[in-house]
């Protein structure tokens, strides 16, 4: 990102000129979402700003150890306009949900910091590096560029987002800069055991039951290169799972040896949520784009605007097979 110095300076100027600042991210929070948001809250607090983390969703159990969550407020608890609104890890304003979008639009100035290729540059200031594997990496580089001193809490937030959005540093988007960023964060005495146990070693009974139910639905296509699993509303009810408990299922399926593309179809009241993960042969964005979605080459999502799981499965498999057909030659 060649103009990071200039963009970081513009961000600092906006922060300096603002007193009341909102920080938010997309619905269905994940590690990069919460890591980047809580890290930004930490920095703004250190700079003496009045900061609010606008949160319109539940924090998954595995991320409740993160610092600065006490700054979170629901949209209906907020009755003032903000001098500055900083959106993190959200490719467009709609990803934040209608309630937060209204607050975003009412703010005097807006900033968008992200790493998604599909980002629409929707703010007054846009700092988007789609070559970066995580928004937390972008944010860490901004803080470094501005010579802002971190602390253990901020570093922990940034490392958590970096670790989760890179698949524990396994994805092809990881670069030498990613490892350098992680190395620099460890200078702040991160407790790696705290991150590891909470994020990777604390799967609940309910989440486990949901995983088992989903795996019982698995079907293979195209010489076992495509695997599809379903999560129905009944599965969610019978396993007593939280909404976030479906996270990780699509990655679990991708890791089957023959599978090049894993597909998760999650039944909602009025639509079906699509999650895609691939290894090397399929660009997930090319499949997701056919279903009102986007994301990254190896990880994308979308929305299917009906609730017929069998029809959705057939449609997604057809598009995926078209993509695989080109790689078979």
Image (spheres, helix red, strand yellow):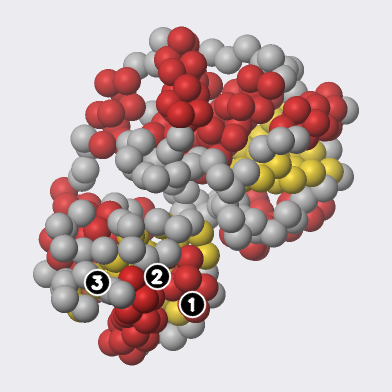
The answer for how far apart the CA atoms under marks 2 and 3 are is 14 Å
- Can you identify the residue that label 2 sits on? 274
Tell me whether circle 2 and circle 1 mark residues in contact (CB < 8 Å): yes
- Can you identify the residue that label 3 sits on? 226
- Residue 91 in sight: yes
- Can you identify the residue that label 1 sits on? 291
Please tell me which residue is depicted at 79% across the width and 44% down the height of the picture. Answer: 125
**Which residue is nearer to you in this view: 125 or 203?**
125
The answer for how far apart the CA atoms under marks 2 and 1 are is 8 Å
**Which residue is nearer to you in this view: 179 or 218?**
179
Q: Can you give x and y, in whole percent of width and height, for residue 237 in the image?
A: 25, 67
- Residue 24 in sight: no
Is residue 293 depicted above or below 195 in this figure? below
Is residue 301 depicted above or below 117 in this figure? below
Q: Can you give x and y, in whole percent of width and height, for residue 188 in the image?
A: 47, 11
Is residue 229 depicted above or below 125 in this figure? below
């Amino acid at each position: 990102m060649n103009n990071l110095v200039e963009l970081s300076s513009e961000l600092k100027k906006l922060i300096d000129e603002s007193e009341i600042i909102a920080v938010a991210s997309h619905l269905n929070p994940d590690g990069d979402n919460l890591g980047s948001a809580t890290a930004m809250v930490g920095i703004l607090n250190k700079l003496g700003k009045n900061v609010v983390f606008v949160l319109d969703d539940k924090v998954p159990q595995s991320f409740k150890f993160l610092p600065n969550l006490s700054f979170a407020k629901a949209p209906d608890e907020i009755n003032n306009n903000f001098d500055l609104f900083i959106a993190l890890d959200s490719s467009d304003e709609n990803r934040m949900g209608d309630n937060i979008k209204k607050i975003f639009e009412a703010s005097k100035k807006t900033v968008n910091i992200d790493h998604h290729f599909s980002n629409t540059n929707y703010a007054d200031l846009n700092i988007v590096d789609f070559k970066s594997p995580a928004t937390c990496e972008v944010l860490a580089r901004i803080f470094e560029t501005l010579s802002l001193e971190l602390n253990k809490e901020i570093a922990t937030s940034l490392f958590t987002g970096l670790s989760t959005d890179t698949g524990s540093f396994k994805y092809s988007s990881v670069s030498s800069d990613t490892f350098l960023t992680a190395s620099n964060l460890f200078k702040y005495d991160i407790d790696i055991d705290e991150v590891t146990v909470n994020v990777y070693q604390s799967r609940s009974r309910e989440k486990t039951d949901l995983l088992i139910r989903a795996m019982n639905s698995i079907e293979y296509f195209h010489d076992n290169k495509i695997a599809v699993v379903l999560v129905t509303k009944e599965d969610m009810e019978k396993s007593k799972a939280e909404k976030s408990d479906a996270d990780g299922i699509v990655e679990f399926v991708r890791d089957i040896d023959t599978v090049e593309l894993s597909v998760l179809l999650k039944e909602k009241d009025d639509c079906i949520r699509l999650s895609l993960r691939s290894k090397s042969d399929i660009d997930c964005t090319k499949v997701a784009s056919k279903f009102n979605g986007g994301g990254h080459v190896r990880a994308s999502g979308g929305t299917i605007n009906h609730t017929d799981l069998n029809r959705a499965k057939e449609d997604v498999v057809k598009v995926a097979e078209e993509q695989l057909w080109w790689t078979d030659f």
